[in-house]
Amino acid sequence: GAVVSQHPSWVICKSGTSVKIECRSLDFQATTMFWYRQFPKQSLMLMATSNEGSKATYEQGVEKDKFLINHASLTLSTLTVTSAHPEDSSFYICSARDRGTGYNEQFFGPGTRLTVL
Amino acid sequence: GEDVEQSLFLSVREGDSSVINCTYTDSSSTYLYWYKQEPGAGLQLLTYIFSNMDMKQDQRLTVLLNKKDKHLSLRIADTQTGDSAIYFCAESMTGGSYIPTFGRGTSLIVHP
């Protein structure tokens, strides 16, 4: 149980294009989903927190118009990197909390490797 | 300085014990976690400890917490090659909606 998937697992795109990454909770309903960014040899940096049906809360320094987050259902959140540039290349990881347990554990997806040429 | 600090690398021989150390700064931390990340994958929660505990053991894993020194350690007994991964220490607080703050991770390399 408690499986989180991400799609795609990796993507290469040209500079200036937009890329959408999906995060799904497969066997539970997620009240809250989180989006992280991880640079090589670095920690996970929380980008934003999204609750189903409401606007995402972005961390300081994260451009909300650059990183669009939509949490349309209790099992799906999407992150769209708009007008991507090489500096957006990174490993993006989502996580989700199980609505049913009420426990604060986050279940992490396998991550999406974005490379912007 | 960073909120959660870890050494970046640890190399051990297969069968030996591994000890990964972590220090944190916030004394109001409620939960302290250890996550494992294998190459190209997301994070897997290995274990966690409440701040009012000193020790927790789960099979080959032993977590020790020294609240006075704000020091957390993860001991892996009988380390195997499959334990090679990056291990992240993290803390969370009640006031922070339990969202973990992660360290930079310790790369554990297990060699034969």
Image (cartoon, coloured by chain):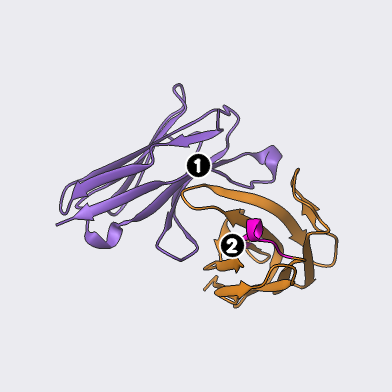
Chain colours: A orange, B purple
Residue kind at label 2, given as amino acid type:
Ile
Residue A102, visible in the rendered structure: no
Task: Name the disc covering residue A89, or none.
Answer: none
Q: Are marks 2 and 1 on the same chain?
A: no
Please tell me which residue is depicted at 69% across the width and 41% down the height of the picture. Answer: B96
Residue A16 rendering spot, x and y as whole percentages:
75, 68
Is there any visible trace of residue B99 in the rendered image? yes
Q: Residues within 10 Å of mark 1 (few under 14, many from 20)?
A: many
Q: Which residue is mark 1?
A: B103
The residues tagged by marks 2 and 1 sit, at their Cα atoms, a distance apart of 16 Å
In the rendering, at what x and y percent does residue B49 appear? Answer: 46, 43
Label 2 marks which chain's residue? A
Q: Nearer the viewer, residue A37 or A27?
A: A37
Q: Secondary structure at mark 1?
A: loop
Q: Quadrant of the C terminus of chain B?
A: bottom left
Q: Is residue A30 above or below residue B34?
A: below
Q: Residue at point 72% right, 70% down? A: A78
A36 lies above or below A100: above
Q: Nearer the viewer, residue A73 or B111?
A: B111
Taking the image as shown, residue A68 lies to the left or right of residue B82, namely right
Residue A44 painted magenta: no
User: For the magenta stretch, what is the residue range?
Assistant: A84-95
- The residue to which callout 2 is attached is A93
